[in-house]
Image: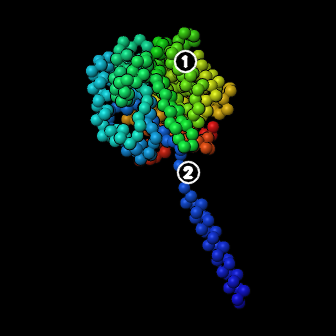
Amino acid sequence: MKQFYTLLAAVLLLSACKQKTEKQEATQVKPAPDFVVAFGSCNMSQEPNLFWDDIVAQQPDVWIWGGDIVYADTDDVERLKAIYAMQDTVAGYAELKKEVPVIGTWDDHDFGVNDGGADFAIKAESQQVFLDFMDVPADSERRNQEGVYASHEYELPSGKVKIIVLDTRYFRSDLIKSDDAQRRYEPTMDSTATILGAKQWQWLENELNQSEADFNLIMSSIQVLSGEHGFETWGNFPLEVKKLESLIAQSGAKGVVLLSGDRHISEFSKTDIVGLSYPLIDFTSSGLTHSYSSFSGEPNQHRVGEVVSDKSYGIINLYIQDKAAEFKMMGDNGEVLQELKQRY
């Protein structure tokens, strides 16, 4: 009988240990990301934005404006200033600015003209208004350069993150209008046509070639990889797309990711590039206050998953030691609408 009780005690002890181990495994907390990026585009200050409190709750290390911060569409500088000022009065955005560093770029509607480019008459004045809104110091070099492009580096205990914001407006060549009723623009093979302009291209090459970051995020206001839909896209300048892809592959920069906005939809695009050891992802997040809710489909040979036509913002969780990234399209109250994971 004594042996029986001894055996029973041993069985109960083993069972308790097993249950404890299973409980510990079930409640094991996933390691926190080393760096969290939140970003979005297409925001009307006069429309409700449901996401500011959700974004703050994500505790991002930075917020990136992906363009169309406001909808101004004006060549009146004073009106442009007033519309930006209206955005600063939005309580949720003001709270985010207290908690999170804000960087970013513009797109056409905050630039000042729909689908606008290099020939916009007040682009220099518009640039200064944009820099004022972004709280760029008066003595910053960005005040003297043409274009709002910039680079931001973040030093972490585990490594480095670089965020490059491009200007796809200031230098962009004219678009070719399409005769096809299903398309707005047609691609051009003109070798002199450009999106970034010579100076910005040289700057971008230096930023990537000299980067020591573990991840390099490139914010382009317009989509890079989705180029078949006939609206604004890098695809309207195929030679510029090839130039960008070659630059990324040849630079040796680690963990390059493309971010974009503009389209009032969100989607993941992914492609393999010769010379790049990982797939290139273009994470489109748009829009914050209004979206293409009647979206019924469009071609994109690089799409991964489904198009999200609900209002949303983007979250990127970076894990430096694991060389991994999590991309999430976020809805209201922390809802994950779609996600993608990638190792680098």
- What kind of residue is marked 1? Gln
Residue drawn 46% across the image and 15% down it: 171
- What kind of residue is marked 2? Pro
Crowd around label 1: few <14 · some 14–19 · many ≥20 (10 Å): few
- Residue 280 sits in quarter: top right
- The quarter of the picture where the C terminus appears is top right
Q: Earlier in the sequence, mark 1 or mark 2?
A: 2
- Asked whether the residues under the numbered discs 1 and 2 touch, taking CB atoms below 8 Å apart as contact, a structural biologist would say no
| Residue at the outermost bottom position | 1
Residue drawn 48% across the image and 13% down it: 173
Vertical placement of residue 139 versus 122, above or below? below
Q: Secondary structure at mark 1?
A: helix
In space, the residues marked 1 and 2 are separated at their CA atoms by 38 Å
Q: Is residue 37 left or right of residue 18?
A: left
Question: Which residue is the site of mark 1?
Answer: 202
On the image, the x and y values in percent for residue 170 come to 44, 17
Q: Is residue 48 left or right of residue 330?
A: left
In terms of depth relative to the viewer, which is nearer, 142 or 81? 142
Vertical placement of residue 82 versus 38, above or below? above
On the image, the x and y values in percent for residue 294 come to 43, 33
Nearer the viewer's eye, disc 1 or disc 2?
1
Kindly identify which numbered label has been placed on residue 309.
Answer: none
Residue 303 seen: no
